[in-house]
Amino acid sequence: MKWGVVTFPGSNDDHGTLHVLREVLGHEAVSLWHKSRDLHGVDCVVLPGGFSYGDYLRCGAIARFSPVMSAIGEHAAQGGLVLGICNGFQVLCEAGLLPGALVRNRSLSFVCREASLRVESVANPFVNMALVGDVWRIPVKHGEGCYIADESTLDQMERDGQILLRYCRDDGSRSRDGADGSDYNCNGSLRDVAGVMNATRNVFGMMPHPEHGADPALREVSWPGSGVPDGLRIFQSIAGWVADRGQRLAVDSMR
Amino acid sequence: MIARVFITPKKGVLDPQGRAISSSLHALGFGEVGDVRMGKYLEIRLGASPEGDPSARVRAMCERLLANGVIEDFRFEIDQESPGRGA
């Protein structure tokens, strides 16, 4: 499969993401400059973390008007996959490709640590190398990661399985009514949301950084013998889904 | 002509900055302080536009870029006079 990783002015996790895609997964991955309208036929576009346009006005508010974003809007409208990480998630919300918004962490502090994430849904392209209820450990680092949406939107997303990851305790448990004041939820997001997908199930945004928890060489330093790093499973899920889709299309064309 | 745009968090949207400011004011002895909501204020200098009605133009600016309707409300005033000293 072919990946594209966008670079906005102020993106800073674009190269880390390219490293994981190329060196850890061994896939083809191209860098997409924000002024480009050509996505080079990629299967999945990644909007990386960072501080696009210095986070001026609101995080992601200026980046959404980049030329590359109109191409990404068309790519998404045609069913192409889009993964937004951290600032990329903020850009997707600002662009209206995902519901809701990301605001200042309730603590007002920048958080930089590993988060425990409960897998909430697996029938999707982004989180499928897992079982519902699995707990993944993936790093977070952000100041404005508090996800909010109105109650009816949150209810609808829960019902339709669009909330893929939630913050949880290390054993997977959560407070009954979600965030308020629970320290397992690093930013105070409503209903402990860490990552959400759109209604057509091809655009996904998450605050944690899978690319920072994906290279076994790094993982081995902190957690020797811990097996496949959980961040890598996000990229492997997408790659597996794209490969399956390719096979389905090939079978269909023979009918 | 100058447009003065006020952007505030929507009612019901968390405003942790406002809450922190409120508790700081309490700590300084301003016990009468209740809820604080923190927003943004922009001064936008406007030239003549062939598109006409400046009020409709400023509204469009707010809706498209300046405010995020999911979390923010906006209001604005348009002033024919020049901005104050130093502007």
Image (cartoon, grey):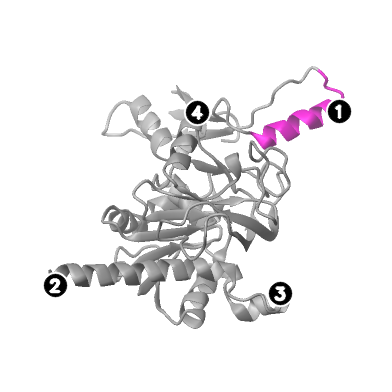
> What is the quadrant of the N terminus of chain A in the image?
bottom left
- Identify the subunit bearing mark 2: A
Foreground label between 3 and 1: 3
Give the structural element (helix, strand or loop) at label 4: strand
Q: Earlier in the sequence, mark 2 or mark 3?
A: 3
Give the structural element (helix, strand or loop) at label 2: helix
Q: What numbered label is drawn on residue A187?
A: none
- Identify the subunit bearing mark 4: B
Q: CA distance from mark 1 to mark 4?
A: 30 Å
A148 relative to B73, above or below: below
What residue do we see at 54% from left, 61% from top?
A: A49
Left or right: where does residue A126 sit relative to residue A39?
right
Q: Is residue A29 magenta?
A: no
Residues rendered magenta in the picture = B15-31
Residue type for callout 4: Asp
Residue B52 location in percent, x, y? Answer: 28, 28
Give the structural element (helix, strand or loop) at label 1: loop
Label 3 CA crowd tier, 10 Å (few <14, some 14–19, many 20+): few
> What is the quadrant of the C terminus of chain A in the image?
bottom left
- Identify the subunit bearing mark 3: A
Residue type for callout 2: Met
Q: What numbered label is drawn on residue B73?
A: 4
- The residue identified by callout 1 is B28
Foreground label between 1 and 2: 2
**Tags 1 and 2 touching, CB below 8 Å:** no
- The residue identified by callout 2 is A254
Residue type for callout 1: Leu
Residue A241 location in percent, x, y? Answer: 37, 66
What residue do we see at 55% from left, 65% from top?
A: A210
Foreground label between 2 and 4: 2
Q: Main secondary structure of the magenta part?
A: helix
